[in-house]
Image (cartoon, rainbow, N blue to C red):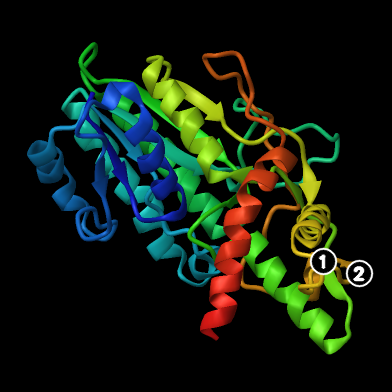
Amino acid sequence: MRVAVTGARGRLGRALVAALEEAPFTGPLGPIAWDRASFDLDAPATFGALLDRDRPEVVVHAAAWTDVDGCARDPELALARNGAATRALAEACASRGLDLVFVSTNEVFDGRRTDGRGYAPDDAAGPINPYGASKLAGESGAREAYAAAVAPNRGALGVVRTAWLYGPPGADFPAKILAAAERARAAGERLRLVADEVGSPTYTADVADGIVELIGEAAIGGTHHVVNTGRASRAEWARELLRRAAALRPGVGFDVPTEDVPAATWPRASTPPAWAVLEPTPLPSGEPLRPWQEALAEYLPTLLRQHAAAGAAR
């Protein structure tokens, strides 16, 4: 099976390419990795020719403009890149009978839930920022494109929502926390951590494995919430990270006192949802992704090596 990945050099795209390389159904040639030079969100008119050239059977659309503050400053560009470009890709795929997996986000929900439940796929969407609105436009555009295509040759559409992604190549939330902890310790200050945002910390390698399972089991169709199990505030996530990092690298500077603060401590262009928890949907195996703490523990050695290399380069 020929599987193409858009945004192949992004955080999730890298994990997808790696997971698909190990999947038996992609064959000896592995996946088709489309980076920005091949697949440009600002050039949707080229998508059809790209599909005809490389002839994938399945496309995993991981490319997106994920700078949420940038999206807030330029909502029209966000809608073009995350909404209109996704519709164009879906139309091109559906008209050729190809399957499409579109990676979306928890930010299609408003985050105002107070009942302690994670958002389910059929809960009403209502984004509160331009990034979420642009991704919801992508979902809607893709669904409309597949609904309008001629059955039964239109292929399957899957929407995979995830949340609070982290993983290589760095500059993710865990990497920023390690760097901030060292700065706070050097300054003799407490590390301030956001306590009023709660979400589903999710490791890119696990999301990639979940998507590969959906493809391999011909279970793409529908809306899937693919996140590590459990939930945490930003502060809880950070403290678990620092606890584990200090145990692995004692004396380096990760054992620092912390202080819980509201997200409003740092004004920003975008308004993130306060409740970013997704209720995981069953994968074909029936097994959910592992708890977020276990995934974080697996990622930590890689993160610490990256952190040390970045420090040596400064």
Mark 2, residue position: 259
Dot 1 falls on a residue whose secondary structure is strand
Is 40 situated above or below 100?
below
Give the residue type that dot 2 points to: Glu
Label 2 crowd (10 A; few <14 / some 14-19 / many >=20): few
State whether residue 220 is above or below residue 226: above
Q: Earlier in the sequence, mark 1 or mark 2?
A: 1
| Towards the viewer: 275 or 59 | 59
Q: Along the line of sight, which residue is nearer the eye, 179 or 129? A: 179
Q: Amino acid at mark 1?
A: Leu
Which corner quadrant of the image does residue 307 belong to? bottom right
Q: Mark 1 to mark 2: distance in Å?
A: 6 Å
Tell me the SS state at disc 2: strand
Cβ atoms under marks 1 and 2 closer than 8 Å: yes
Give residue 139's quadrant in the image.
top left
Q: What residue is rendered at 51% in x and 82% in y? A: 313
Residue 269 in picture, x, y percent from top left: 61, 72
Residue 41 lies left or right of residue 253; in this view the side is left
Task: Quadrant for the N terminus, please.
Answer: top left
Q: Position of residue 2 (x, y in %)?
A: 22, 29
Q: Which mark is residue 225?
A: none
Residue drawn where x is 19% and y is 34% of the image: 29
Say which residue label 1 marks.
Answer: 193
In this rendering, position of residue 293 left or right of residue 202: right
Q: Residues within 10 Å of mark 1 (few under 14, many from 20)?
A: many
